[in-house]
Image (tube, rainbow, N blue to C red):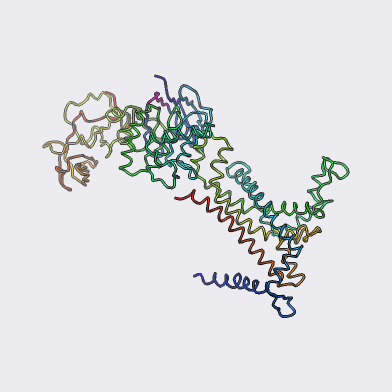
Amino acid sequence: MTDGLVLDGVSAAYRDTTVLHEVDLTVARGELLVVLGPSGAGKSTVLRVVAGLEPVTAGRVRIADRDVTDERPGRRNVSMVFQSYALFPHLTVVENIAFGLEVRDTPRRLAREQARAAAETVGCAGLLDRRPGQLSGGERQRVALARALVREPDVFLLDEPLSNLDLALRAEMRAELRALHERIGATMVHVTHDQTEALVLADRIAVLRDGQVEQVGTPDEIWRTPASSFVARFVGSPAMNLLPADGPLRPRGDAPTLKDEELLEIGFRPEAVALDSTEGTPATVERVEVIGEDAFAYLRLAAGQQVVARVPAARRPDRGATVRLDVRWADTHLFHAATGRRYQP
Amino acid sequence: MLTPYLIGLVGLVLVPALVTLGMSVTDYDLLRPPTWAGLNNFAALLDDPIFRVALLNSVVFALVAVPLRLLLALGLALLLHRRAAGVGTARTAALLPTAVPEIAYGLLWLWLFNPLYGPINQLLRAGGENGLTVLGRTPPQWLTDPTSARAGIILMSLFTMGETFVVLLAARRALPRDVYEMAAIEDATGWDVFRRITLPLLAPVLALLAVRDAVASLHFTFVPAFVVTDGGPPPYATTYLSLFVYQTGFEYLRYGYAAAATLVMMLLTVAAVLVQWRLIRRYRRFYQV
């Protein structure tokens, strides 16, 4: 498969502070890569570097097998959906969508026709004569998407396009975005801090932390074999529990062989915790959050560590009660305590 | 809360305006009590060749100087809105002439315009021979040639666009950055960006500044014409409405007549505001939020 986008050891700085450290990323043609990370991780900078809005201090950027590192943004054949949508307030929807074509000297009539077609693709064909000020958040989002679609760019860059929408609309647009990607089969890089969005949308996810790629993998890989305790805790809500491996909790089942002396941490998701066993580690229930059918019990072990457990709401423990919690080795992850990297036995 | 402002408004604006209105239908020279003149003053204005010249001068000045000032301020604002080496100094330089007291500014230009030892003409004569420019022409006789004098007053007014510049600078810096980044990704040329984005987004501010400048242009011709050219050179080349009113009232003591001319000036202002207000309203619908 040819590569849609390659970042090769890319570093970038903002006012003398390095925000990207030798990032290597490869996006296959037609793939939807989600860049996931907390605020300040450098997610947006990745997009801006690809678009050419931010210069690299080291490394190369290749789009569709073409080195574009020194090309200006307009010559890279990318299109971008900004978090703020960046619609032109004085232009109508159809003028907004046709803008990129018109400044590239496409005849006006043709540009308008293509704009109309793009608007139909994302379902905003009924808004063509309105101005951005008259649109709702979701409608603006569609217009921004149509504007990105109207040309045939080599890469689509989407900078948290769903973050300004309310929850229901976000879920809807998420599904539409996924469907759209499957329909047009374009190379897309989608930036978000929302792990659900990443898991739902992505072909692959790149988890970014402090300007460095922590892990790249399919949503399954990210979920099942997180490469570090950071990834493990960032993906999943509430976050994965993390305890010293030689600590108070002894999981059941066959323990993996631990070959070195290094300090390890044991991680397990709230779903992996069972509270109804007769044996297991005693803990006190500090607080219980009920979310519909689910309940999250925040437990305090005798040694002082906190553990979160997900239990059916109907069988939730009372606050202050003492429970015995149990985890199977099969549901755990081991990480080096010092580096946070995954332990490979 | 509004009382002090209202007292000021009544005492300093409304009452004088009413007095002006009252005086405009009388003959009054400060010595004898005013006598009723009806619309005679206005009728006389229509036939007064000096008034007509002053009116024409004022209108021409507004039509030429206002767009030029706006263009200059816009150009400088777009040039100097980014942070770069020397930009701060350049901004200060653009603003400085506006901060000079008007009379001092006028006296300064009196020197600049001097046909013999003034720096402007010395510069124009550079490289030429026998007191002519490089092209073999006589440099403008700023203070004695009617056309050159009018041009001179306009030239003077160009450098006092500091306020307009500051407003446009602030307006340009307030425009969203992502819109420009969007344009860069779409490979829009500088001209396209200016024509399709910057100009329309700044249009409401520009329109407002044009109204303000058009209104003010009736006033800011006064000091230059008073100090630098004294309304001359003949025939009344730089006698603008404001100077005409001043001379009629305070030099010839024809207060009734001056009041009538003032009213005409006011009507002209109102007309200018109305025309431009309509223009602004046409733009307004672009910016419904």
Q: Is residue A142 magenta?
A: no
Could you tell me which quadrant the C terminus of chain A lies in?
top left
Q: Position of residue B62 (x, y in %)?
A: 67, 55
The front one of B284 and A297 is B284
The front one of A76 and A265 is A76
Which picture quadrant has residue A162? top left
Q: Which residue, as the protein is rendered here, is positioned at the far bottom?
A: B33
Q: Position of residue B58 (x, y in %)?
A: 70, 58
Residue at 20% over, 26% down:
A255
Which picture quadrant has residue A208? top left
Q: Position of residue B136 (x, y in %)?
A: 84, 41
The front one of A40 and B145 is B145
Q: Which residue, as the protein is rendered here, is positioned at the far right?
A: B130
Question: Viewed as shown, does residue A205 lie left or right of B64?
Answer: left
Does residue A227 lie above or below A301 as drawn? above
Tell me the chief SS of the magenta region: strand
Residue at 68% over, 74% down:
B38
Does residue B270 lie above or below A14 as drawn? below
Q: Which residue, as the protein is rendered here, is positioned at the far left?
A: A278
Residue A34 visible (yes or no): yes
Residue A46 visible (yes or no): no
Image mark count:
0
The front one of A5 and B210 is B210
Question: Viewed as shown, does residue B124 lie left or right of A53?
Answer: right
Question: Viewed as shown, does residue B22 lie left or right of A247?
Answer: right
Residue at 49% over, 25% down:
A60
Q: Position of residue B230 (x, y in %)?
A: 78, 61
Residue at 63% over, 63% down:
B267
What residue range appears in magenta? A24-30
